[in-house]
Amino acid sequence: MYKSTRGYEKLVSSSYAIINGLAEDKGLYVPFKIHKLKNSLEYLAGLPYEELAFCILKEFLDDFCDDDLRDCIYKAYDKKFEDNKILQIKSISNTHFLELYHGPTLAFKDVALCLFPYLLNKALINNKQKENILILTATSGDTGKAALEGFSDIPRIKIAVLYPKDGTSLIQKLQMITHRSNNSLVISLNGNFDDAQNCIKNILNDSKIKKEFNDNGFILSSANSINIGRLFPQIVYYFYAYGNLLNKNIIKHNEKINIVVPTGNFGNILSAYYAKKLGLPINKLICASNENNVLFDFINTGIYDRRRILKVTNSPSMDILISSNLERLLYDLSNEDSILIKNLMNSLEIQGFYEIPKSLKEKLNKIFYSDFATEKESINAINKVYKNFNYLMDPHTAVAYSVYEKYKEKTKDKTQTIIASTASPFKFPKTILQGLNVNTSNINDIEALNILSKKTTLPIPTSLKNLDKKPIIHNNICPKDKVLQAIENFAHIGGDLLD
Ligand SMILES: *Cc1c(COP(=O)(O)O)cnc(C)c1O
């Protein structure tokens, strides 16, 4: 069963939590309890990815029958992934890059968003729901296309994606506005990512709006990582990576590892924390921020302060000031003190900041370490790693790598370490070229793709080829106060419904 972090809601089933996304009391759904896995790490290390996913998801989706769950997993993880491999691991001495970007949109979000729509579709059936679903998603660049792709023509589900007009890379934007499917709407918002996320949260938290959509046959929900169903598939790859290191004898039975995660909304690193609760031996979880270093400040001072200007950086998927999933971590670390959580989150919303009690901060620092990297530092890291190891990192992974280098320098820790490698370098070709000392002042992303491919002799990923020649399907630009109307029109509220 699932409960809300803010403590005002009854227990609900996993299907209900997945369908509804956010709890009524505005909290986030969390599992009632997370138990250690019964299977040994050695056993898990021997499983193919799909069966490992089954073992782990089974823990959380207790109202899904085994056949249904397997069906979802096998449909999600098929030829959509390069070489039929969900992920790849590349090692440079004690550092292991967990490449999570070999899916259809070249970002780690594919791993969850290829599976999530199937889970949602089954959840509708489990819950005997008559309504259809309208998914609302805010994106800082990668979620949008991954969600559009994952939900493409899935029965009974429509999807609307909201992205900040100037907040994504050209390639990310083209990926979204050229997306063709029968059930999608893409809106460009006059605002930044936090505005987009707030816009969606405000709609999802408004009982009047929700009722209006309900009366017209739609349940509103979210595919952002505020939906607990997004997080479970991400736990799987940390176990898989651990098993891979075990199988290669890089680590011994029960040896602890570090995991470094380039962090934005705190979903990916929270999944690693849940993996730890399930029994994965983790020494430190290293939270890497870019110059929007709210999380770095928070983990080091105990004060979360969003009162600052959001900077658009070369790692745009981390340009976030409000990391929603932190709420789930604080709930867990505070022994589920929902009154504290409610007060903290109210203070964040109204005053723009909060400070956690000292005892809570101590617990946080036992597990989490955080630092940040500037744009320049991440470009230097791209340069250094390519020069020394002939390995190409994307700007987000480069932030993680820089932070990890600083961590090693400071702590002299020699623990085997996994770096979550979250996007293909080809998604951010201009930044990568800057890392390779190529002047990019007069070229755009598309030209940069070709130059990057020539220079490194790596092929351009198929899904990015001819991106600039595809017809533009979506060209809506909205101010904040017109978003709801655009979504209503898309769902035909007031008009004829449910085609
Ligand atoms: C979304 C994203 C992140 C941040 O992940 P969170 O789960 O939001 O913390 C990092 N890198 C890339 C490439 C992303 O797309």
Image (cartoon, rainbow, N blue to C red):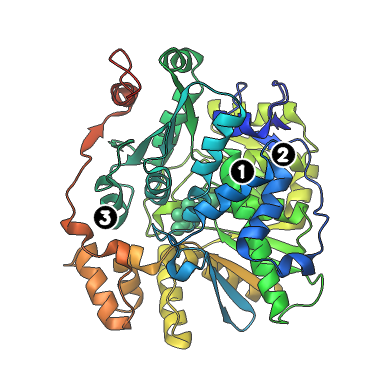
Q: Which mark is residue 170?
A: 3
Residue 267 in sight = no
Please tell me how crowded label 3 is: few (under 14), some (14-19), or many (20+) other residues with Cα within 10 Å.
some
Q: Position of residue 426 (x, y in %)?
A: 34, 67
Number of residues whose C-alpha sits closer than 10 Å to that of mark 1, classed few (under 14), some (14–19) or many (20 or more): few
For the point 30% across and 47% down, the residue is 176
Percent position (x, y) of residue 472? 18, 46
Q: Which residue is mark 1?
A: 68
- Horizontal side of residue 432 vs 407, given as left or right: left
Whole-percent x, y for residue 285 in the image: 67, 60
Is 179 above or below relative to 257? above
Q: Nearer the viewer, mark 3 or mark 2?
A: 2
Residue at the spot of label 2: 62
> Would residue 478 be visible to someone looking at this image?
yes
- CA distance for labels 3 and 1: 38 Å
Q: Residue at x 44, y 16 (%)?
A: 209
Disc 3 element: helix
Quadrant containing the N terminus is top right
At numbered mark 2, what does the secondary structure look like: helix, strand or loop? loop
